[in-house]
Image (cartoon, rainbow, N blue to C red):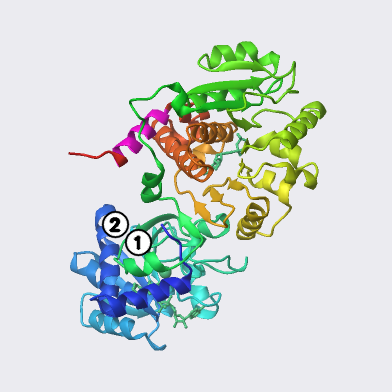
Amino acid sequence: MKIFTAEQISNCDQYTIKNEPVSSVHLMERAAEACVEWISENCNHHRNFVVFCGNGNNGGDGFAIARMLYQKGFDIDVFTNTKIKFSTDAQENFRHIKEISGITIREFKEVLNYRFDSRTVIVDALFGTGLSRSLNGDVKDLVEFLNQKKNIKISIDLPSGLLADTVSDSDSVVFMADYTLSFQFWKKSFLHAETGKFAGKVEILDINLSEDFIEETETGDFVIDDEVIKSIFKIRNEFSHKGTYGKAAIIGGSYGKMGAVVLSTRAVLKAGAGLTFTVAPKCGYEILQTSDPEAMFIEGGKDYIENFDVEETAVCGIGPGLGTHEKTAKSLLNFLKSCSKPLILDADALNIIAQDPANLNLIPVKSIITPHPKEFERLFGKTENSFERTELAKNKSRELHIYIVLKDHHTQIITPEGKVFYNITGNSGLAKGGSGDILTGIITSFLAQKYSEHEAAILAVWFHGKAAEFASEKHSKESMLPSDVIKEFGNVFSELNDKVQKLL
Ligand SMILES: NC(=O)C1=CN([C@@H]2O[C@H](COP(=O)(O)OP(=O)(O)OC[C@H]3O[C@@H](n4cnc5c(N)ncnc54)[C@H](O)[C@@H]3O)[C@@H](O)[C@H]2O)[C@@H](O)CC1
Ligand SMILES: Nc1ncnc2c1ncn2[C@@H]1O[C@H](COP(=O)(O)OP(=O)(O)O)[C@@H](O)[C@H]1O
Ligand SMILES: [K+]
């Protein structure tokens, strides 16, 4: 799914109104219907809603939602500011709601005397994509007041005060939603930590905006949705043999960190590679042969790795548990100098490279590197916030002609062409040592299976998150272990096969 800026979204609305058989006010009606449908389906314990409506079209949505919820039998109160001029469509919906005697309309300032029942849901329809500056004055006070309430809060389109595509000033006041019902597209601000925290759980509601506009409008930012995944995943060929699925090698491990290669190797195996090797120090021989018997062991040193050579045709994932021993570092850098095929570089491989900026140029083109934010900083330097980090990653991907998998809650895959793919699978159950090792294994496995670097990185990140979702359902986010995540790979493949199967 494409991610658009606030300006592009507004253009999309206008294009739809101009070119499709729908008027502006009908599009608002469609948007409100989608919200009301979601609320009716999901809201089982709450009967009363208090809707806060601004003067623009976001407020118009709010009036229409209030009317429709009332017609469905919910108790509704509405707050607005009648002293400021409404937009045309908001005015029309305000007119409709005034005619309903069962709905009381109050001015914002009356909120201080309003009795919030603990089961009242607060709906924020103050500002959406039209927000042009930080909240101030009365409306800022209102949002601060509402944020103190313990009630469930739903934002329409965007939490008020949040900009769609960039970070707000750190002292800006933003409505703190539990749920955000947003129209048609993911907004970039939902996907970054500093701003996404205001949106709560995000639901994207389809309001049928013009497909032609969406198709023709260029963007560099995408969300990895089912369509992206279906276009990448390949069904396993029955007329195949192990050679069809490639050779993969995990290179890593050091005394005390052998678990990282065990997990990484197991992830390669369970993600479907044909032949799997582990290059690890001798001290890991028994551990690896016992834990992952399907993989072949290659001795890469005694207590730490000194030899990175594996079969020419194997795809190499380097770094899990590798350590940064001087001799390991020296031989890794020598290996990089002699290597021209794309590699997967993670963890200590990145920490070794980060020791000297000149090392960055040794990374073979089209390699996939998988830094978490701290490793990214060691490699490329500090940034003010995660939006800037993504921009820096885009520059570096272009410059070095590599793929950067910037690991985060919404991990980003950044391509040498400057495109950014945001992942929306996964959860905080992955915030544990060992999760990244698994991701390295999955990417290595998919690359060995002849997915392109671009496809392998995107599919693997999505896959990793999806497996975490299955694992958390069984074990909880708190208790799930990276090894539980690997056990769910089978369920993810079943889901993938179901998605792409040609059903009779
Ligand atoms: N036909 C359409 O264009 C549709 C628009 N929709 C809704 O319309 C919204 C966008 O509507 P608008 O473009 O009218 O914008 P908003 O309703 O987000 O609000 C913008 C209004 O607030 C003012 N404003 C901006 N920042 C302010 C601030 N900090 N303090 C006080 N006032 C401020 C602006 O001057 C403008 O009058 C979307 O988020 C969505 O909810 C949906 O109904 C779908 C269809
Ligand atoms: N809160 C979270 N939500 C979603 N994914 C997460 C979260 N925390 C961590 N992850 C994922 O888990 C992995 C952790 O990687 P990393 O920090 O390198 O772990 P390790 O050091 O164990 O290898 C990344 O893929 C990251 O995106
Ligand atoms: K809003």
Estimate how packed mark 2 is, as few (under 14), some (14 to 19) or many (20 or more) residues with alpha carbons within 10 Å.
some
Estimate how packed mark 1 is, as few (under 14), some (14 to 19) or many (20 or more) residues with alpha carbons within 10 Å.
many
In the rendered image, residue 504 lying in the magenta stretch gets the answer: no
Q: Is residue 311 above or below residue 160?
A: above
Residues 455 and 339: in front is: 339
Indicate left or right for 147 with 239 as reference.
right
Q: Tell me which numbered mark, 2 or 1, is placed earlier along the sequence.
A: 2
Q: Which stretch is magenta?
A: 488-499
| Residue at screen point 63% across, 37% down | 341
Element marked by disc 1: strand
Q: Amino acid at mark 1?
A: Val
Element marked by disc 2: loop
Q: Amino acid at mark 2?
A: His
In the rendered image, residue 495 lying in the magenta stretch gets the answer: yes
- The disc label shown at residue 121, or none: 1
Indicate left or right for 434 with 456 as reference.
right
- Distance Cα–Cα, label 2 vs label 1: 7 Å
Pointer 2 residue: 46
Residues 75 and 22: in front is: 22
Query: Which quadrant does ligand 2 occupy?
Result: top right
- The disc label shown at residue 44, or none: none
Magenta portion: prevailing SS class: helix
Residues 200 and 253: in front is: 253
| Residue at screen point 30% across, 63% down | 35
Pointers 2 and 1 in contact (CB under 8 A)? Answer: yes
Residues 237 and 85: in front is: 237
